[in-house]
Image (tube, rainbow, N blue to C red):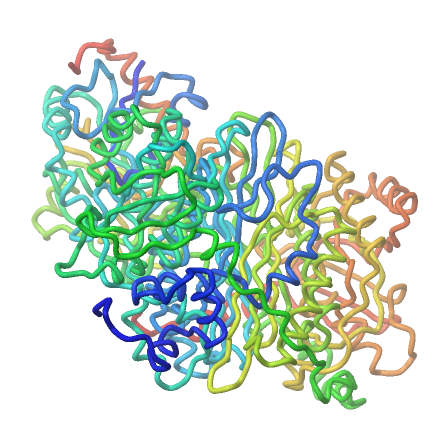
Amino acid sequence: MTFAVVVFPGSNCDHDSYYAVEHVLGQRATFVWHKETSLAGADVVILPGGFSHGDYLRTGAIARFSPIMKTVADFAAAGGPVLGICNGFQILLECGLLPGAMLRNRDVQFHCETVGVRVEQTNTPFTASAKAGSVLRLPIAHGEGNYYAPPETLAELERTDRVVFRYANAFGETTDAANPNGALDNIAGICSEARNVVGLMPHPERACESVLGSADGLVIFESVVASMAARGTVGALSR
Amino acid sequence: MSTTTTIDAAVLERHGITRDEYARIVELMGREPNLTELGLFSVVWSEHCSYKSSRVHLKTLPTEGARVLQGPGENAGAVDIGGGLAAVFKIESHNHPSFIEPYQGAATGVGGIIRDIFTMGARPIALLDALRFGSLEEPRTRRILKGVVSGIGGYGNSIGIPTVGGEVMFDESYSGNPLVNVFCLGIAKHDAIVKGQASGVGNPVYYVGAKTGRDGIHGATMASAEFDDKSAEKRPAVQVGDPFMEKLLLEACLEVMATDACVGVQDMGAAGLTCSTSETGSRGGVGVEIDVALVPQRESGMTPYEIMLSESQERMLLIVKRGRERDVERVFEKWDLHAVKIGEVMANDRLCVKQNGRVVADVPNRALTDEAPVYHRPMRPPAGREALQQMPASARRSPMSPADTWLTLLGSPTVASKRWIYRQYDYMVRTNTIALAGLGAGVVRVKGTERALAMSVDGNGRYTALDPRAGARLAVAEAARNVACAGALPIGATNCLNFGNPERPEIMWQFAEAVAGIGEACRALDVPITGGNVSLYNETDGRAILPTPIIGVVGVIEHASRVLTRTFRGAGHDIVLLGENRDELGGSEFLKAIHSLVRGVPPALDLARERALQRLLVDLAEQGVLESAHDCSDGGLAVTIAECCFDTGAIGADVALAAVRCDDADADSVVATLFGESASRVIVSVMPERLQAVLDAARRAGVPATRLGRTGGRTIKMAVDGTTVIETSVGEAEARWSSALASWFEGQVA
């Protein structure tokens, strides 16, 4: 299976996603430059973390105009699994593949730490192998991860079970103390209506080896491998 | 400025050029310089760029060793880490800009040192910072600290290089002159290291990166003068950083360097185009000719003088192989960057600057670089030094109980957890960070190998103030010891020497003594100096900072899985002190935090013993027999043991210090036993079944080793001679330690 890791000029977690897929997961990873228009037959798309175009205006605001994003949107529309991590999540929000927006963290500071993330939904390609309600230890590293959506959007997300991850303490409680950035309802990640596009602020690619402090993020990559194999759609979606 | 301005005393003063220096310029040129040429000399001959006061002393440092691939003189040093790979690293200061404009000053400090590393063809993978601030009680200090921390994070986080460690100390002397020293380390293959040399007559000289503006003109000259109440007016001399631009530059340069289309690369840092052109030419023994009209400019109407002296950030100079121009241009086009041919390498020894074909400056390269003045400045030990080294007897006592004294120390900003700071730094990006920030030395694995690199920056200005030579030796020892505590063999060092005005004989004496101390310790511990930076004139309104040599040491550990951190790892492990507990309170955090005193003699350091201790730690780590290791420094044994309990989920400790009690059987020696800062001490923890092996290994190595007690429970308990002097829950102690720094900032909007 091939994962396309999209590289924007300011991506800085592209190598980390590549490494997790290629060297830990044992699958194939390829870098796809943002000026390109082809995903070269990839089965999964990762929009990695970073500062896509410097993000002086708004995180991800310029990245949605990169040529590759039209191809990514087509890939998503055809049901292809797309994972947006951190800045990748912000880009998915900016280009409308996921609803809502990011505000600055409530204490207006950048936060880098390992937090608890509760798995809310397992019927997405990126959480299929995870246990519902389990708490993953995942790093966060962002200044704008304070998820916001208008009340009607939020209600719709809840009604359709599209909140995929929430910040939680070790006991799985979604307390305010466990919320590192002020995100509404402790939301750490959501999925699209068709459930194949998932965005999250935490960095699963940084938590794939115990030597780095946690291997809890690996299940997200394993999930997509398992669900694609089960669907039998490997190699069928991208061009 | 017009080039026809007459050069008079006022012009010279504005350029920081003395009359003697001007006479030398005229002699080297064989004529009077024009104003542009004077500008070139003023920046390259500034203290910051020329090291004119420090050079004679720096020459005495050990710079060679079996592992040294590149010593001082290039953009950064390099040491062999095995497997055909090199660690390329350096530390640099950005003190003056960080005082004037904390966010941009610190941010561009990070940007500058990163450029030094990738200029060498290395991929930067780790940053560390040594920071010094005044008292947090001053609102100005809090504002500076907040700005510096967000500036470091703002740049490092964006560009995607993790800040994996560092240290912070507080003292009133830094109030009007904070220190921001940034260390960066990169990895390169031996044969891929690129130098800042021009060669090959006719080869084109390329300008790449951001456009040139009027920012930072005379930044190097500013960094070579003291501060006064007019300093705020110098704000335009602080540059503005653009980490996104530097990220593009980094990727593009590494991509170009991988093609072998370049013969030399030089960062445009201090003194911008002037330094980069004259240094590449003089190192390569060739001439360089450029036309400033070809330089991409951000503002209109810039004069050659302004273009040559601008310190706009994120720019590089490339010497490209003739015929390979398109290969280079194609890469920069991909990254949407300017790559403009502005001149070429000449078969002479001159720096020739033209504007639209007309010569506006023509100077012998070596006159700027190698012929820069060298000063043997007068030196004199400061008066009152003996008095400073006397410690009043009352200072050896605490007005509080040992337990309350200990809690006070845990809450002192220098000792307290720096989590509020490092949480604002991305310390994990690139997925190499093994020892997380705050756990000791910064440790990153080297992907594609089994190895990891440990690095630490250290320097205690109080010790250096009391005895510069001893303080500098202790700084080297502590940085190397921290690296050894991670299980890594120290293999190389870099230094950043922060001192006051060298024109004062007392300051120059401090500097010379400190450099001598660094040399002694680096020789004994086998960590050659591969480069670094000197920052002088760290004074405000005539008051100098504590003399602060910061030493960065890099070590290599063969198996990344064996890295040790400071934290206890379970209950029932034996706690062992390696080293000797002596009655040494001079310059200690105890004196500072409890009595507001910087007095006494710094702890004695036996370099042979220090070396034996470090080698023992590396051996024990390699054998995998230790559970944790933590250097014993600020706050002494009692603070160190507490720190081993923190960040563990409340693993306690029960220790009896009778065996390591300092000699005198009076109440004072309890204070010295708990809080003394003897050098060459490490607290390790070990499984009971391995205790004997560790004690035996220590005995063979000639390192004193004493079992103090055991880990476990949820209480930290310490007894001296059978009397329990400290008994506090880990939770209470840790709350004090972890909230102390944050409490100064919480509730405020950044």
Tell me what residue is drawn at x 18 percent, y 40 percent.
Answer: A91
Location of residue B684 with respect to B284 vertically, above or below: below
Q: Horizontal placement of B119 versus B317: left or right? A: right
Position of the N terminus of chain B by quadrant: bottom left
Q: Quadrant of residue B736?
A: bottom right
Q: Position of residue A17 (x, y in %)?
A: 36, 30
Q: Position of residue B90 (x, y in %)?
A: 53, 50
Q: Position of residue B607 (x, y in %)?
A: 81, 56
Q: Nearer the viewer, residue B112 or B82?
A: B112
Tell me what residue is drawn at x 21 percent, y 43 percent.
Answer: A53
Location of residue B727 with respect to B552 vertically, above or below: below
Position of the C terminus of chain B by quadrant: bottom left
Q: Nearer the viewer, residue A7 or B418?
A: A7
| Residue B125 appears in the figure | yes
Q: Horizontal placement of B409 versus B318: left or right? A: right
Tell me what residue is drawn at x 14 percent, y 22 percent.
Answer: A37
